[in-house]
Image (spheres, rainbow, N blue to C red):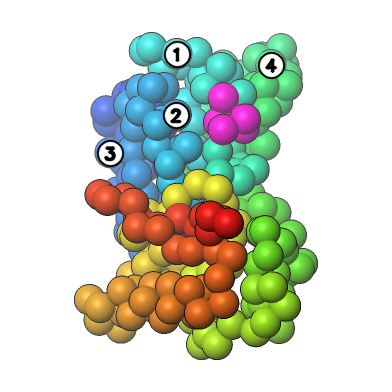
Amino acid sequence: MQRSALAVLVVEDHATIARQVVAFLDGLGWHTDHAATGALALDLATRVSYDVIVLDLNLPDIDGIDVCRAIKQRAPRNVPVLMLTARDAFEDKARGFHGGADDYLTKPFDLRELALRCEALARRGRLHVGREQQVGPLTLFPNELRATCHGQPLALTPSGIRLLALLVEAWPRAVSRSTLVHALWGTQPPDSDALKSHVYALRRALEGIGGMRLVTIPQLGYRLELADG
């Protein structure tokens, strides 16, 4: 059975391990970003919406537990964190869970198990997506593939609704173009202008009603904002 594409941030300072993990996950058709420091991990995690963050406990600049706590406080949504470490004592595991980790994998590990754990965490993180979601005057009904703004229906295709759902889930943070493409179409988007076309349609639909707007963030992606007034 084909795996659905996930957006994963791998935070690992050991170059060999990082290359192996990224290469394996990329081979599954997933979108994988890499950070070798806690500072870069926090920057990415607060600007991009990921399905899972794979976080090494031992980082050169910031303690992994502190990075995990900061991600849980600042990330666009409650992104699941899979913590990696060579420490296998109960006290170390307890410290990781108390720091906000959702799962724990001890080095050395099987890359296949890493992928399975990522998928399980992503499924848990998406359990709430089917419920009605509200952002300002915008209401999203994911199960019905429809949305309203100020009570008026938005004229969007199913792909447009899924695009809106990704932006609503990340709100008020931005979502990168690459994350949106992989979430909507995996590794085979229809063509190079597919995302641009859906963004244009969503922007026009929101502007036609007012109250919300879709903003382009240069060099990153897109973000929903409440319209002034």
The answer to whether the residues at label 2 and label 1 have Cβ atoms under 8 Å apart is yes
Please identify the quarter of the rendering in which residue 186 is found: bottom left
Mark 3 lies on residue:
19
> Which element is circle 4 on?
helix
**Rounded to the nearest whole Å, what is the CA distance between mark 1 and mark 4?**
16 Å
Mark 3 or 1: in front is: 1
Residue 60 is situated, as x and y percent measured from the top left of the image, at 36, 12
Q: Mark 2, residues whose alpha carbon is within 10 Å: few (<14), some, or many (≥20)?
A: some
Q: Is residue 13 above or below residue 8?
A: above
**Rounded to the nearest whole Å, what is the CA distance between mark 3 and mark 4?**
27 Å
Please identify the quarter of the rendering in which residue 89 is found: top right
Mark nearer the N terminus (3 vs 2): 3
Mark nearer the N terminus (3 vs 1): 3
Mark 4 lies on residue:
95
The tag on residue 171 is none
Q: Amino acid at mark 2?
A: Leu
Give the residues drawn in magenta, as a range: 70-74
Mark 1 lies on residue:
62
Q: Mark 1, residues whose alpha carbon is within 10 Å: few (<14), some, or many (≥20)?
A: few
Mark nearer the N terminus (1 vs 4): 1
> Which element is circle 2 on?
helix
